[in-house]
Amino acid sequence: MVSVENKSVLVLGLGVSGSAATALLRRRGATVVAIDGADTDTLRRDAEELRKLGAEVRLGVSVSPAGKFDLVVVSPGVPWTNPVLKSMVERGIPVIGELELGYQHSLCLNVSITGTNGKTTTTEMVERLLTRHHVKTIAAGNIGLPLCRVVEQTRELDLLTLEVSSYQLETTQFFRPAVAVLLNLTPDHLDRYPAMADYVKAKARIFANQQAFDWAIIQSEALAQLRSLKVEIPAKVITFSAANRRADICLERGLLLSRIEGWAGPLLDMDHCLVRGPHNAENLMAALAVGRVLRIPLEIMVESLKTYAPAAHRCELVAEINGVKFINDSKATNLDALHKALLSMPSGRGGEPNVWLIAGGKDKGLEYHDIGPLLSQRVKGAFLLGETREKIWSAWGLFTPCVLVDSLIEAVHQATRSAVAGDVVLLSPACSSFDQFQNYQQRGEVFRQAVKNLEKTTVGEANRTVPKNKTAAAAEFVAAKK
């Protein structure tokens, strides 16, 4: 543990992570100045609580505070381009993140999980199988519970189960998982990273401090990307993949199969699980591999994973109204997540497109053209909102009819008027939520409530003329918007 007692610390960025870091620093005897560029009602309430602990809190601050600091603790949402952070770096002040601070004061080993998609699901799966085997653990980190908030509990834990993001890994120093999981690597956060290689290298920091006796559980395709960038993995490696049958754990005809010596054979039948799709197969493989290296009996893992249900906002069926399914996939904040969601939707009659897609939000610097062929196969029409709507429209307009809308509620109502029995109205934004919402959870809740209101009023059959085919459906859709 690195002592912060009697040290002067600047916490940059409040919110959930910064507030947890500030509180921990005060409990450990540090003098703390905490600042945030925003000044909202929520931040004001948090600031009052932190001031009661003895922290100096300043909101609406965009310049470097005066004074000498021994350490800067930065929240994950603060980029390196932030002027205050840049000035601290120029002054030679050490910078760490909230995750690193929590790690330095924790008293147990950890299993840490990262990747572009599937982090939360896999973290919940690992926590579930550990708990079922009477291993004392808490799921924390990027999952919504900051590590700094549970530091005192680690004295009583066997393991921490951590979801970690690339933003958090950027500011690690000594952070070292006993078991590190990398699920996948697809384009994301390219508004923060200059290139995909920079994003990959940030994710790879999860392995940086591992030793030869630690474990690295890596999707085989992600491992190939790491090797192409000459990233070294010092730990023992287990690979998994839904597409590569040469991986240590792979998917074949719905079965998760192991090729690991002493553990070879079928592990789990996907038909016996509540989760579906190749992406969830990989999440299950990763969880099983964690259990294997921690010596949890297979039968205990299987029983706990078979009954795992997906968390909210992840391809969640909200309702079925007049034969139309309304599905909330608000957690899909990048194109790979949207791709997986579309492939997991029920097919239309005769293989015709049957999805009315609601997408858009804050731009993350992604290119939207590549998903076009899949849109033409699965999507009847798209309703686009948020700051990226025109950018997405220009990329998708050749593949599916697109309409620009001003709000999520408007998108739900227009999609409802267009949909017929057997169709799916899918919220899968492929963008972050921060242009119009506090987070993806709030976005998903707005969608849920809009659908629930539809249930109460019951959509009239007069608005549900059934198109004869894809061409007729598209023509009717476009004509209705003129």
Image: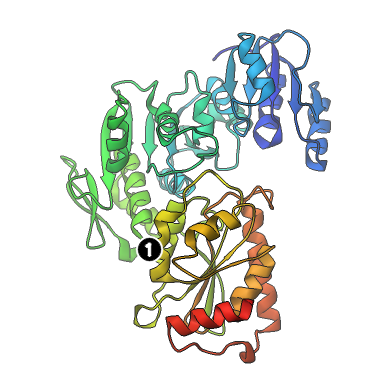
Percent from the top left, x then y, of residue 116? 44, 43
State which quarter of the image contains the N terminus: top right
Colour logic = rainbow
Percent from the top left, x then y, of residue 367? 46, 49
In this picture, residue 295 sits left or right of residue 368: left
Q: Is residue 6 above or below residue 480?
A: above
Give the class, few, some or many, for how many residues have Cα within 10 Å of label 1's Cα (few <14, many ≥20): some
Identify which residue, 13 or 482, lies in the foreground. Answer: 482
Percent from the top left, x then y, of residue 60? 80, 31
Identify which residue, 24 or 231, lies in the foreground. Answer: 231
Q: How many marks?
A: 1
Given the image, on which type of amino acid does mark 1 rest?
Answer: Pro
In this picture, residue 197 sits left or right of residue 120: left
- Residue 135 appears anywhere in the view: yes
- Residue 276 appears anywhere in the view: no
Quadrant of res 15: top right
Q: Residue at x 16, y 41 (%)?
A: 262
Task: Look at the numbered disc 1 and give the secondary structure of its residue.
Answer: helix
State which quarter of the image contains the C terminus: bottom right
Q: Residue at x 50, y 23 (%)?
A: 172
Quadrant of res 31: top right
Q: Is residue 350 above or below residue 271?
A: below
Percent from the top left, x then y, of residue 87? 67, 15
Q: Which residue is mark 1?
A: 373
Q: Residue at x 43, y 49 (%)?
A: 125
